[in-house]
Amino acid sequence: MTPPMERSVPQVLHDIVGNVEEIIRSEWRLAKTEIKETAAVRAKDASIFGMGVVLGFYGIGFLLLGAVYGLSMIVGGWRAALVVGAVLALVSIGLMTASAKRLKGRASSNR
Protein backbone atom coordinates (compact mmCIF):
# COMPACT_ATOMS: atom_id res chain seq x y z
CA MET A 1 0.00 0.00 0.00
CA THR A 2 1.12 3.48 -0.75
CA PRO A 3 0.87 6.07 1.99
CA PRO A 4 -1.78 8.78 1.47
CA MET A 5 -0.49 11.95 -0.16
CA GLU A 6 -0.07 14.72 2.33
CA ARG A 7 -0.71 18.28 1.23
CA SER A 8 -0.23 21.45 3.11
CA VAL A 9 -3.10 23.72 4.11
CA PRO A 10 -2.09 26.44 1.60
CA GLN A 11 -2.13 23.86 -1.21
CA VAL A 12 -5.60 22.67 -0.21
CA LEU A 13 -6.88 26.27 0.00
CA HIS A 14 -5.33 27.04 -3.39
CA ASP A 15 -7.14 24.04 -4.91
CA ILE A 16 -10.44 25.10 -3.30
CA VAL A 17 -10.12 28.65 -4.63
CA GLY A 18 -9.25 27.30 -8.09
CA ASN A 19 -12.30 25.01 -8.06
CA VAL A 20 -14.60 27.85 -6.95
CA GLU A 21 -13.21 30.08 -9.72
CA GLU A 22 -13.85 27.35 -12.28
CA ILE A 23 -17.42 26.86 -11.02
CA ILE A 24 -18.06 30.62 -11.29
CA ARG A 25 -16.64 30.71 -14.83
CA SER A 26 -18.80 27.74 -15.83
CA GLU A 27 -21.93 29.32 -14.37
CA TRP A 28 -21.13 32.59 -16.16
CA ARG A 29 -20.73 30.78 -19.50
CA LEU A 30 -24.00 28.93 -18.91
CA ALA A 31 -25.84 32.15 -18.04
CA LYS A 32 -24.50 33.89 -21.17
CA THR A 33 -25.59 30.96 -23.34
CA GLU A 34 -29.07 30.92 -21.81
CA ILE A 35 -29.43 34.68 -22.30
CA LYS A 36 -28.39 34.40 -25.96
CA GLU A 37 -30.86 31.60 -26.57
CA THR A 38 -33.68 33.50 -24.86
CA ALA A 39 -32.84 36.67 -26.79
CA ALA A 40 -32.94 34.79 -30.09
CA VAL A 41 -36.39 33.38 -29.30
CA ARG A 42 -37.65 36.81 -28.17
CA ALA A 43 -36.28 38.49 -31.30
CA LYS A 44 -38.13 36.00 -33.48
CA ASP A 45 -41.35 36.57 -31.52
CA ALA A 46 -40.92 40.34 -31.75
CA SER A 47 -40.37 40.22 -35.51
CA ILE A 48 -43.51 38.13 -35.98
CA PHE A 49 -45.43 40.61 -33.83
CA GLY A 50 -44.03 43.49 -35.92
CA MET A 51 -45.16 41.81 -39.12
CA GLY A 52 -48.62 41.43 -37.61
CA VAL A 53 -48.72 45.13 -36.75
CA VAL A 54 -47.68 46.12 -40.28
CA LEU A 55 -50.27 43.82 -41.84
CA GLY A 56 -52.87 45.18 -39.42
CA PHE A 57 -52.16 48.72 -40.61
CA TYR A 58 -52.54 47.59 -44.21
CA GLY A 59 -55.80 45.87 -43.30
CA ILE A 60 -57.16 49.00 -41.68
CA GLY A 61 -56.13 51.00 -44.74
CA PHE A 62 -57.97 48.65 -47.07
CA LEU A 63 -61.05 48.72 -44.85
CA LEU A 64 -61.02 52.51 -44.98
CA LEU A 65 -60.53 52.40 -48.74
CA GLY A 66 -63.49 50.04 -48.98
CA ALA A 67 -65.55 52.47 -46.92
CA VAL A 68 -64.61 55.29 -49.31
CA TYR A 69 -65.52 53.15 -52.35
CA GLY A 70 -68.79 52.07 -50.78
CA LEU A 71 -69.74 55.60 -49.84
CA SER A 72 -68.76 56.85 -53.29
CA MET A 73 -71.64 54.83 -54.69
CA ILE A 74 -73.98 57.17 -52.83
CA VAL A 75 -72.09 60.48 -53.08
CA GLY A 76 -69.16 61.66 -55.19
CA GLY A 77 -65.74 60.11 -54.68
CA TRP A 78 -64.16 63.22 -53.20
CA ARG A 79 -67.09 63.61 -50.79
CA ALA A 80 -66.78 59.98 -49.71
CA ALA A 81 -63.06 60.43 -48.99
CA LEU A 82 -63.81 63.67 -47.14
CA VAL A 83 -66.47 61.99 -44.98
CA VAL A 84 -64.26 59.01 -44.10
CA GLY A 85 -61.33 61.33 -43.37
CA ALA A 86 -63.48 63.60 -41.19
CA VAL A 87 -64.83 60.63 -39.20
CA LEU A 88 -61.29 59.35 -38.65
CA ALA A 89 -60.13 62.80 -37.57
CA LEU A 90 -62.99 63.13 -35.07
CA VAL A 91 -62.33 59.66 -33.64
CA SER A 92 -58.61 60.39 -33.31
CA ILE A 93 -59.29 63.75 -31.62
CA GLY A 94 -61.63 62.03 -29.18
CA LEU A 95 -59.08 59.34 -28.38
CA MET A 96 -56.25 61.84 -27.91
CA THR A 97 -58.38 64.11 -25.70
CA ALA A 98 -59.50 61.24 -23.49
CA SER A 99 -55.95 59.93 -23.26
CA ALA A 100 -54.55 63.37 -22.40
CA LYS A 101 -57.11 63.77 -19.60
CA ARG A 102 -56.21 60.36 -18.18
CA LEU A 103 -52.50 61.10 -18.37
CA LYS A 104 -52.95 64.44 -16.62
CA GLY A 105 -55.06 62.76 -13.95
CA ARG A 106 -52.41 60.12 -13.33
CA ALA A 107 -49.61 62.68 -13.33
CA SER A 108 -51.37 64.80 -10.69
CA SER A 109 -52.20 61.77 -8.54
CA ASN A 110 -48.54 60.61 -8.57
CA ARG A 111 -47.30 63.83 -6.98
Image (cartoon, grey):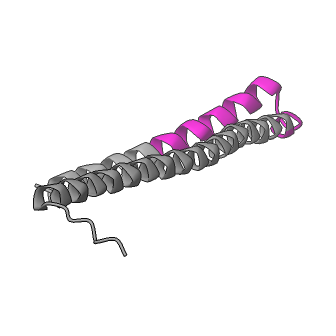
x and y percent of residue 57 in the render?
68, 38
User: Which of 76/107 is in front?
Assistant: 107
Q: Main secondary structure of the magenta part?
A: helix
First to last magenta residue range: 70-94
State left or right for residue 23 relative to residue 107.
right
Which of the 4 image quarters holds residue 53?
A: top right
x and y percent of residue 84 in the render?
69, 36
Residue at x 55% of width, y 36% of height: 89
Quarter of the image containing the N terminus? bottom left
Quarter of the image containing the C terminus? bottom left
With respect to residue 98, does 93 lie above or below?
above
Q: Residue furthest front?
A: 1
Residue at x 24% of width, y 49% of height: 104
Residue at x 69% of width, y 44% of height: 52
With respect to residue 97, does 2 lie above or below?
below
State left or right for residue 49 relative to residue 108.
right
x and y percent of residue 49 in the render?
64, 46
User: Which of 1/34 is in front?
Assistant: 1
x and y percent of residue 77 in the render?
81, 26
Q: Residue furthest bottom?
A: 1
State left or right for residue 10 relative to residue 93.
left
State left or right for residue 48 relative to residue 9.
right
